[in-house]
Amino acid sequence: MSLIKVFEGDNIGSIAHIEIAYHTDFESWEPAKFKTGKSWQSIPIAGEMAELKRKTKDDPNGLIFTYSGFFDIHMIRDEVELKLLPFIGKRAVLRITDNNKRVHIIGKPHNPVLLDEESTTGKLFKHKNGYQFNFFVNQTSAASSI
């Protein structure tokens, strides 16, 4: 008897859409309910320049699910710095939709995602000018998937 079946459908890589919220924006969790006036905020990412990875490992306290990845945003500009730099640090919960239309919610109000940023003008005219945001979280349960 086979443990799983062979998958024969489409399998598209990368991330299609990212949304972010402050860990303090939630009134309750499971199901997630926002405080009045709060909601997911969409982040326009640069094409295929995004990735979500999961690593699962056993620990004396149980399974640990590590989620990490990055997303790029084109062009160094004030708009990005004013809207996204306040999320830097352990402040965010992310809702990530991959190109296979699977949705992953990583982080929780009591265990937010660590977000950091690196920006570059690039060395040459043809190089990328913009930001790379990296994210990371260890959690004791798998990401909520829709």
Image (cartoon, grey):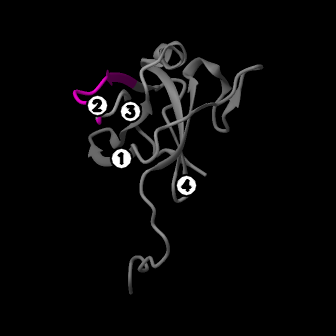
The 10 Å Cα crowd at callout 4, few under 14, some 14 to 19, many 20 or more, is few
The 10 Å Cα crowd at callout 2, few under 14, some 14 to 19, many 20 or more, is few
Name the residue: 53% across, 12% down: 82
Q: x%, y% of residue 38? A: 70, 22
How far apart are the alpha carbons under marks 4 and 2?
Answer: 36 Å
Tell which of 37 and 77 is nearer to you.
Answer: 77
- Foreground label between 2 and 3: 2
Which callout, 1 or 4, points at the residue further toward the start of the chain?
1
Tag 1–tag 4 contact (CB < 8 Å): no
Name the residue: 63% across, 32% down: 29
- Foreground label between 4 and 3: 4
Instruction: Name the residue beneath numbered marker 4.
Output: 102
Q: x%, y% of residue 71? A: 41, 36
Query: What amino acid is labelled 4 in the image?
Result: Arg
Name the residue: 67% across, 27% down: 28
The 10 Å Cα crowd at callout 3, few under 14, some 14 to 19, many 20 or more, is many
Which callout, 2 or 1, points at the residue further toward the start of the chain?
1
Instruction: Name the residue beneath numbered marker 2.
Output: 125
Instruction: Name the residue beneath numbered marker 1.
Output: 53
